[in-house]
Amino acid sequence: MPTQSKHSKQSKATAPLTLGNPDTPPNSPTQAHGINVVTSDHIQQFLDILKRSVQGPPDSGPEPPPEKGEEKEKKIRASKIEYKTVNEVFVPCTSKWVFVELTDLVFSWNKSTYNKNLPEASFVDVKSTLLRDILRKVLKGVTCISLREDKPAVDRDVLFTYLPQLKEYRLQNTQSESAERLHLDKLIEFLEMHYASVSEKLRALLVHNEITFELLPVFFQPNTVIYTNCTISEQPRCLMFDSGQEKTVDGKKYFKLSCHCLTDDGNCFGEAAATAQISEFHGVMKITSLPVYPLQYHVAKREIVQKLTERGRKFISLRGTHFLAYKGMGVYNDKRGVRKFPVDGRVMVDAVSFREKNPNYFFPRVNEKPYGLSLDDIEISLSHTFNPDDDADGNENDVIKERISHTEQDLLLCKPTVFAFCLSSKQWAELAVTNLEAINWDSSAFSSLVMPEDKKEILQSLVERQTTGLDQRPFDDIIRGKGQSLVILLQYEFSFNFVCSYS
């Protein structure tokens, strides 16, 4: 008996621990094929999992040392000259859709397709610092994307529109077999492969100056000049194209173009937002038949550039207050819509007073930089510039100093209308810059004045002296604004007196 007892205890100690069905009572018999053997390795793995769940994610504290025999692969940024397509994945613990970070690639093409109600959104996630720096140079001035981030995300259509510039940069600014060229080649390869069919259709249509509605997103290149007609004044104008997007309102699809121009709102002179749109059309259409299209496709591009550049100079010269003549249509845009009326007579151009008297009028927000330099900062001589203060028979070749700093392209983007008050109809309106002219004063009116010649000469000299150099006079009056006026008393033999006052 003692021997059997000892043997039974030894058998009990060496027997492996078994687990059967958890719903089976402890003393119930189990079948051999249902037994799972738990070894010490299983227990150690379970303890490791339990330990990691208690400690939390790695970013909540110092990273634990790797297990023995396990080497952690360290990914070097842009170490692989390749790219991959990355689809958005759902993370249950955060209930968010995210993209997997692949830092060892040159770039990745990220596609977001989880929301079936929205069109597919895709962009190129740049990982390579060399490729990022190249894009900053080639896409300089493009405002629809941001390249300031360390790993910027760039719209794929924007990159395709700049494919010729990318190829040109590759040939002129990169060396063969250099890292820059290898990374740029991979991006060019991606664009050529994914836009192969689009590029073929686009080339075939552009040969005949035609386009389809579906190709508009890759037809308009950001940061280029486009041509259209002003929706208010119906005057031709140019805008700088920033970005485009297809939209649908009340079941009607259209392509919206976000642009900017140069304008003066009475407070400052600078960039202002402007929009244009192209309604959906079927089949092909001539590019010049579109309501807005790139300026380079205009049949008379050189004449249009010259005409709008001269108008831009005239627009800048009209800053401030000017007394002019106008013949054309006046436009006033209020809540009831655009109201037009004919104007034929003298007007007062004054954006500041227009803003004060029409506080509810729509004025676009003007970004004073980089065009908002003070008029006292820079002076540039412009010859053949419109001067509204000159007489009609004055010298057209007089050089006028305009205190501005603008390129020819900036003058091209100036707004086609100015704010003014119409003296004949007593109405505020926007007037076309092209139709504004200097007043042709009637010199015969003074000749008809019945008066001795010597006194007429004195009277004319007094008026000419009064109308010139008012701002240069050192003394005004004890009461500011009261002086610098001219009072003339005329007396006749039949004892009729009257006073002519000039302020």
Image: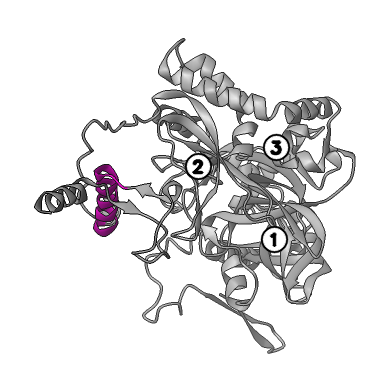
**Residue drawn at point x = 25 percent, y = 52 percent:** 47
Height in image: 91 above or below 295? Answer: below
For the residue marked with disc 2, what is the amino acid? Ala
For marks 1 and 2 on the same chain, the one whose residue lies earlier in the sequence? 2
Residue 280 on image: x %, y %: 83, 50
For marks 3 and 1 on the same chain, the one whose residue lies earlier in the sequence? 3
**Residue drawn at point x = 65 percent, y = 24 percent:** 192
In the rendered structure, which segment of residues is drawn in magenta?
38-55
Height in image: 20 above or below 198? Answer: below
**44 within the magenta span:** yes
Going by the picture, which residue comes out furthest to the top? 176
For the residue marked with disc 3, what is the amino acid? Val
In the image, taking residue 381 as reference, residue 13 lies left or right, namely left
Residue in the foreground of this view, choosing between 434 and 129: 129
Looking at the rendered structure, the secondary structure element under dot 3 is helix
What residue does disc 3 label?
A: 218
What distance separates the C-alpha of mark 3 from that of mark 2? 18 Å
What residue does disc 1 label?
A: 324
In the image, taking residue 398 as reference, residue 237 lies left or right, namely right
What distance separates the C-alpha of mark 3 from that of mark 1? 45 Å
Residue 345 on image: x %, y %: 79, 66
**328 within the magenta span:** no
Going by the picture, which residue comes out furthest to the bottom? 495
What residue does disc 2 label?
A: 153
Residue 173 on image: x %, y %: 47, 17
What distance separates the C-alpha of mark 1 from that of mark 2? 52 Å
**Residue drawn at point x = 45 percent, y = 76 percent:** 483
**Magenta-colored segment: predominant secondary structure:** helix
